[in-house]
Amino acid sequence: MWFGKYEITIDQYRLLRTRLKTIHEPRTQEPKYEAVTMVNHANAVKFCKILTDAFTGFLPPNCVVRLPYDAEWQCCARCGDQRRYPWGNEWPPTAMADGVLPNLLGTERPDWMKKNPDEIIPGYGDGWPEQGDVRKSGRNRWGLYGMAGNVSEWCADPFDRNRSMGKYQGGSWRDYRGAHLAIASASDHPKIPSAFGCGYEGADGNLATGFRIAVGPDHPASANPIQSNEISLPASD
């Protein structure tokens, strides 16, 4: 399978805006490179379906555009080893493979620190008060950006048995707890829901969750799914 190098941006999502729910306005000055948020799980799935239909005949045989499955996301975050976090096993967070700190909740939010002094990573500052440029969100050893922070990412798996809620993985600019940022599944931490991606649907999604796309069979790939991190979509039109 192929795994998206970056999270989907606002401008990329806007290419299909007439066929999807309207999104919030950009929180930075560069919607071309800002990860899209306020997209619920259903619309993330619909985005992928529209791309599959648009590129019929160009995709590899028996492949579709879809969200990554949870196990695939975990594999790509771990980069082939058993690290606890996308950056390694250290706490507090350390730099990714390109030397960039993950975009998490630290000292770059003095307003938040004043109101909630216990709800930041002490002494940690990555320079991003909110979601930032997907190209500067920290690259892992497999060449994927934003796997440790910036925005959390919808997965293809449902969160509950009734399939009424979506599941997401990864940290975001709002996260500060080690349990929430660990790469883990429900079986790893059955008593810590935040460790494996909370179920949050909502009519409009939320400000800290976006998504990236994958191309592969319409079922979970093997234990080592990644073939290439390059999935190209135009940034604007």
Image (cartoon, rainbow, N blue to C red):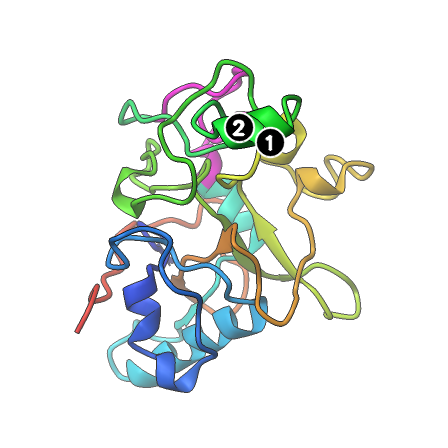
Residue displayed at 29% across by 49% down: 229
Q: Position of residue 222 (x, y in %)?
A: 50, 52
Image quarter (top left, top right, bottom left or bottom right) of the N terminus: bottom left
Q: Is residue 92 magenta?
A: yes
The residue labelled by disc 2 is 85
Please tell me which of labels 1 and 2 falls first in the chain: 2
Q: Circles 1 and 2: CB distance less than 8 Å?
A: yes
Using the rendered view, name the quadrant where residue 14 is placed. bottom left
Give, as a single range, the part of the protein colored magenta.
Answer: 77-96
The residue labelled by disc 1 is 182
Q: Is residue 180 left or right of residue 20?
A: right
Q: Position of residue 156 (x, y in %)?
A: 56, 63
Residue displayed at 47% across by 22% down: 107
Classify mark 2: helix, strand or loop: loop
Residue 116 in view here: yes
Question: Farthest residue toward the left?
Answer: 237
Residue displayed at 34% across by 75% down: 61
Residue closer to the observer: 84 or 111:
111
Classify mark 1: helix, strand or loop: loop
Q: Is residue 58 left or right of residue 82?
A: left
Question: Farthest residue toward the right?
Answer: 191
Residue closer to the observer: 102 or 56:
102
The total of numbered circles placed on residues is 2
Q: Is residue 226 magenta?
A: no
Residue displayed at 44% across by 76% down: 22
Q: Position of residue 41 (x, y in %)?
A: 57, 67
Residue closer to the observer: 206 or 184:
206
Q: Amino acid at mark 1?
A: Ala
Q: Amino acid at mark 2?
A: Tyr
Q: Is 46 above or below relative to 134?
A: below
Residue 222 in view here: no
From mark 1 to mark 2, how far is it between C-alphas? 5 Å
